[in-house]
Amino acid sequence: MKNKIIFLMILLSVVSKVSACSFEASTENNQTASNPAKVEENTAAIKKSALSESDSSALSDISGKTGTYEYKSGGANNEISIQKLEGNKLRVKLYASYEYEINGNLNVNVGEAKGIATLEGDTAVLVPEDTEGCEIALKFSGNKLIVKPKNEAKNCGFGLNVSAEGTYRKVNKKPDFGDSDSNSTSTQNSTTSKQNSKPERIRFAPGKSSTVVSGKISHGEEKTYLIAARAGQMIEIKITDGGANHDVVFSLIAPDGVNPMGDEESGDGYDSGWKGKLPKTGDYKIEVGAIESKNVNFKMSVSIR
């Protein structure tokens, strides 16, 4: 009998402690539920944790977005190169083209855009340099890149029927910028000044494949221009007005630093007119100088087909 009484006392003690714990937990939950500030604090903490995990995931995955992407459909033949920079920044360069035939001759209209984009989640928005109102959204989806431009025809400066829009496929883990910004060095010729002005980009009006550029050589300095083109296109450059001495000449430098016009060391790399097929895709430099004149105005026609 005595043992039964002891057992019942122990059992009652255990039940009492369990009930007390349940009551405390219930009380705490009721207090939290009845306290809006506490609920809001807990909700904010959960959201902050989820956002932090999302940002961390995006930043850790950004390096996988580096590479070269291509889109080909109909007359479109586009390429985008993307390179990871510090933080969540991306260096982006786009070449877009529209190929068509007239009387059996292949013609190509081109467009080019480049700049630094900020990645937010799986999407980056590129606002190309030297443009106003042009925006190009880049959405990453595995090895695909979905590109949707905004105000493209009006503000991006592309040629007729040239569009960046499309679903691109990753074809290389390495970007191929192929421009003078990163991997080309221009050589100089003794007949012109060793100094270069800040490069000025040549753009064609919508639907056009040629333009006339007016410039001035001051104090013997060279005037430098940049123009985007694709390998295999034909370019024709001509000095249409070379001043009173008619001594204005130019040199063409390919994205890899080579002059397709000839050997600059022998003096054949400069001329007042040249037509030929371009060997590389990327930015070409046109360096304009004068043999003797120190200050001279000039006009130069440029066409790409």
Image (cartoon, rainbow, N blue to C red):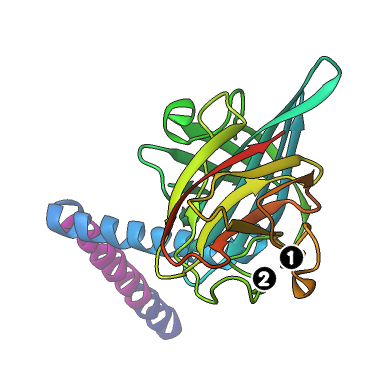
Q: Is residue 252 visible?
A: yes
* Residue 125 coordinates in the image, percent (x, y): 46, 46
Chain part drawn in magenta: 13-31
* Residue 282 coordinates in the image, percent (x, y): 68, 53
Within 10 Å of disc 1 (Cα), the crowding (few <14, some 14-19, many 20+) is: many
Residue at the image point whose x is 34% and y is 79% from the top: 9
Which of 113/54 is in front?
Answer: 113
The C terminus - image quarter: top right
| Marker disc for residue 183 | 2
Decide which of tag 2 and tag 1 comes sooner along the chain: 2
Residue at the image point whose x is 79% and y is 45% from the top: 276
Which of 252/135 is in front?
Answer: 252
Which of 252/241 is in front?
Answer: 241
> Hey, which quadrant is residue 73 in on the image?
top right
Q: CA distance from mark 2 to mark 1?
A: 7 Å
Three-letter amino acid code at the position of disc 2: Asn
* Residue 144 coordinates in the image, percent (x, y): 69, 44
From this viewpoint, which residue is outermost toward the front?
244
- Residue on which the image places disc 1: 256
Residue at the image point whose x is 39% and y is 64% from the top: 49
Whether pointer 2 and pointer 1 mark residues with C-beta atoms closer than 8 Å, the reply is yes
Left or right of residue 137: residue 169: right
Compared to residue 6, the image places residue 273 above or below, namely above
Left or right of residue 177: residue 16: left
Magenta stretch encompasses residue 26: yes
Three-letter amino acid code at the position of disc 1: Asp
Which of 166/98 is in front?
Answer: 98
Residue at the image point whose x is 50% and y is 75% from the top: 195
